[in-house]
Image (spheres, rainbow, N blue to C red):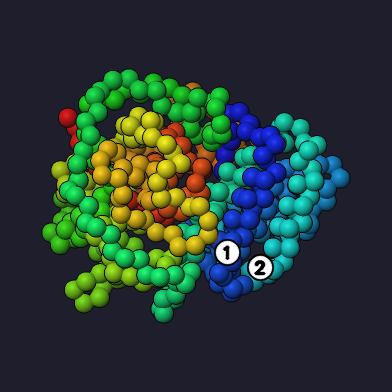
């Protein structure tokens, strides 16, 4: 989470608050206390921690700071559930979030209910500054909903059995998509970034500014599993000339030979997802790849990754609420394209790696106070992703939205779209 330019609140805020908070509970509902406490790696957090951290946000920045009569549920819990807000004092190490067995999942859900009731009661009386923080907190929680799904997948993938999060019918293979097409984009000056006047935006999306775009072509859909299988068959993971030096070191050090969660089954490949273990569907967008892999594939394909300005300029006329995104708890996976032409799947299915480093826009100023810590201090050594995924709550993303991860990370729902210079 970070900050917004202009608050978005009103009569619908109580219902929206309840809907967002309920979705988090629903996402975690298939998990036992033990499963909700597991931390499969340093980058991932237990589901229990996500439920608690998002509650800590509302209790700390809204109820504690703006409702004088409110007393924290348990002041000692702030140490466990602060993430990286230095202004809020010391916190439990991120890599050890899975160690505290207590408080239990039940106790955290009780705390959530208490905070939800207190905040709903306070909403009619909150000043605009506090209502702005409520809207910020809701967008923050939606980010953690996607993180919770990705972290649940990482947790379940550690089980050798391997279990599905939801008991559902296996997906039928999609029709093989036509070969990658492209859309020509003329060069010129494009306006990118959020305008600060309409709707919510994180501070890293601002200020809106001019960006020079050179003539280029943008692929009409994300790269598919079938195309990735050809990259693998032609030695893509064993050809050092395709890889950045750091990426080649990463491939060799980690014995990477396929996207994360893919497993060999004789001569075939299976992929593990929140819906269980299934054959790789050649029609689906490739998912769970690092920036290193995306960059190497683009080079193998005689292309490159688009810049974030190129991506945003092309996505600006597309409905950001379209596509395969998260509407409710349940099976979450990328799906084959359904549209026959035009720029497809710009929103939803997989976050698309760009060739742009996550850096401040010209004139960027982080929000004042502790809540300003979220974005600005991470503008170093990370790459921008665009467009949302199948795990992004519908309505959360927009054309200007900037996600960011380190180049080796791939446990998120990450894929790619190609670009070529004209």
User: In which quadrant is the N terminus drawn?
Assistant: top right
**Between residues 250 and 358, which one lies in front from this camera angle?**
358
The tag on residue 28 is 1
Residue 359 picture location, percent across and down? 42, 34
Does the CB distance between marks 1 and 2 fall below 8 Å?
yes
Q: Position of residue 345 (x, y in %)?
A: 34, 45
Q: Residues within 10 Å of mark 2 (few under 14, many from 20)?
A: many
Up-down relation of residue 389 to residue 201 (above or below): below
* Distance from the alpha carbon under mark 1 to that under mark 2: 10 Å
- The image position of residue 309, as x and y in percent, is 35, 31
Mark before the other along the chain sequence, 1 or 2: 1
Judge by depth and name the residue closer to the eye, 42 or 69.
69
Under tag 1, what secondary structure? helix
Is residue 312 visible to the viewer in this orientation of the structure?
no
Frontmost residue, 256 versus 271: 271
Left or right relative to 405: residue 395: right
**Pointer 2 residue:** 105
Going by the picture, which residue comes out furthest to the bottom?
Answer: 161
Q: Which circle, 1 or 2, is nearer the viewer?
A: 1
């Amino acid at each position: 989470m970070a900050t917004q330019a202009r608050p978005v609140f009103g009569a619908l805020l109580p219902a929206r608050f309840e809907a967002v908070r309920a979705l988090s509970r629903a996402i975690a509902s298939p998990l036992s206390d033990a499963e909700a406490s597991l931390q499969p790696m340093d980058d991932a957090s237990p589901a229990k921690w996500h439920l608690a951290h998002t509650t800590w946000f509302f209790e700390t920045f809204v109820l504690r700071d703006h409702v004088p009569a409110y007393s924290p549920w348990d002041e000692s819990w702030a140490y466990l559930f602060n993430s990286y807000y230095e202004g809020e004092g010391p916190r439990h190490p991120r890599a050890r979030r899975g160690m505290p067995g207590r408080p239990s999942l039940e106790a955290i859900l009780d705390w959530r209910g208490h905070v939800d009731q207190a905040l709903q009661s306070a909403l009619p009386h909150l000043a605009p500054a506090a209502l702005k923080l409520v809207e910020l907190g809701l967008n923050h929680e939606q980010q953690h909903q996607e993180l919770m799904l990705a972290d649940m997948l990482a947790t379940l993938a550690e089980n050798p059995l391997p279990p599905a999060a939801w008991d559902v019918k296996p997906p039928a293979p999609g029709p093989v998509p036509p070969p990658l097409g492209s859309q020509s984009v003329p060069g010129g000056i494009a306006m990118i970034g959020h305008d600060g006047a309409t709707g919510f935006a994180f501070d890293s999306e601002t200020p809106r500014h001019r960006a020079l775009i050179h003539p280029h072509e943008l692929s009409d859909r994300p790269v598919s599993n079938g195309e990735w299988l050809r990259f693998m068959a032609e030695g893509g993971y064993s050809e050092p000339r395709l890889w950045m030096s750091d990426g080649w070191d990463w491939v060799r050090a980690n014995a990477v030979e396929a996207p994360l969660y893919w497993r060999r089954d004789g001569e075939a490949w299976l992929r593990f997802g929140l819906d269980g273990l299934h054959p790789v569907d050649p029609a689906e967008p490739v998912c769970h790849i690092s920036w290193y892999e995306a960059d190497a594939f683009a080079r193998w394909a005689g292309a490159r990754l688009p810049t974030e300005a190129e991506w945003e300029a092309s996505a600006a006329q597309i409905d950001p609420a379209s596509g395969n995104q998260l509407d409710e708890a349940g099976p979450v996976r990328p799906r084959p394209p359904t549209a026959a032409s035009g720029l497809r799947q710009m929103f939803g299915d997989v976050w698309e790696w760009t060739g742009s480093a996550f850096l401040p826009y010209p004139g960027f100023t982080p929000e004042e106070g502790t809540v300003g810590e979220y974005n600005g201090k991470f503008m170093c050594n990370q790459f921008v992703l665009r467009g949302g995924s199948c795990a992004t709550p519908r309505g959360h993303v927009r054309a200007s939205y900037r996600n960011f991860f380190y180049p080796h990370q791939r446990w998120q729902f990450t894929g790619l779209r190609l670009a070529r210079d004209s």
